Amino acid sequence: QVQLVESGGGLVQAGGSLRLSCAASGRIFSSYTMGWFRQAPGKERECVAAISWSGGITHYADYVKGRFTISRDNAKKSVYLQMNSLKPEDTAVYYCAVRRGLVVVTTGNEYDYWGQGTQVTVSS
């Protein structure tokens, strides 16, 4: 069983920064894509960013391009999301997810394991 634990969420003023971390434990796949998703109240879950096994391929939602950076450390089985220039509309619960294989996808139901989520609140 794979467990994902996110950390780094919190309350920040608009324009500020946060760095989310997600660490995997347990018997994980030999290669896997990792992603960050978010869900705001009353809204559907959406993919914020995703990264390939090698880290060489990344995907970003248009509304975070230039502000967020996803990275990973395979030795630590971890993925990170550096969030800069935060806006109130970035307020949501952020989840990390893992998908077996090398292909970067942005559809949530194609991911195999999920963390419990961490709250990010951006005040105006």
Image (cartoon, rainbow, N blue to C red):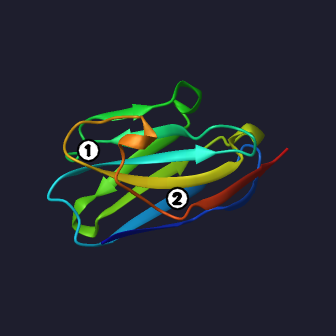
Q: For the point 47% across and 62% down, which residue is it? A: 115
Inter-mark Cα distance, 2 to 1:
17 Å
Q: Which residue is mark 2?
A: 20
Q: Is residue 106 left or right of residue 56?
A: right
Which one is nearer the viewer's eye here, 4 or 17? 4
Q: Residue 56: where, in percent of width, then height?
A: 23, 38
In the image, residue 122 above or below residue 48: below
Q: Is residue 17 visible?
A: no
Q: Give the residue type that dot 1 points to.
A: Gly
Q: Which residue is mark 1?
A: 55
Q: Is residue 96 visible?
A: yes
Q: Residue 29: where, in percent of width, then height?
A: 19, 60
- The circle drawn on residue 30 is none
Which one is nearer the viewer's eye here, 7 or 15? 7
Label 2 environment density (alpha carbons within 10 Å; few <14, some 14–19, many ≥20): many
In the image, residue 72 above or below residue 45: below
Q: Is residue 42 left or right of residue 99?
A: right
Q: Secondary structure at mark 1?
A: loop
Label 1 environment density (alpha carbons within 10 Å; few <14, some 14–19, many ≥20): some
Q: In the picture, residue 55 is in which quadrant?
A: top left
In the image, residue 116 above or below residue 95: below
| CB-based contact (under 8 Å), mark 2 and mark 1 | no
Q: Residue 9: where, in percent of width, then height?
A: 62, 62
Q: Is residue 67 left or right of residue 119?
A: left
Q: Is residue 44 left or right of residue 100?
A: right
- Which residue appears farthest toward the right when viewing the image? 124
Q: Give the residue type that dot 2 points to.
A: Leu
Q: Secondary structure at mark 2?
A: strand
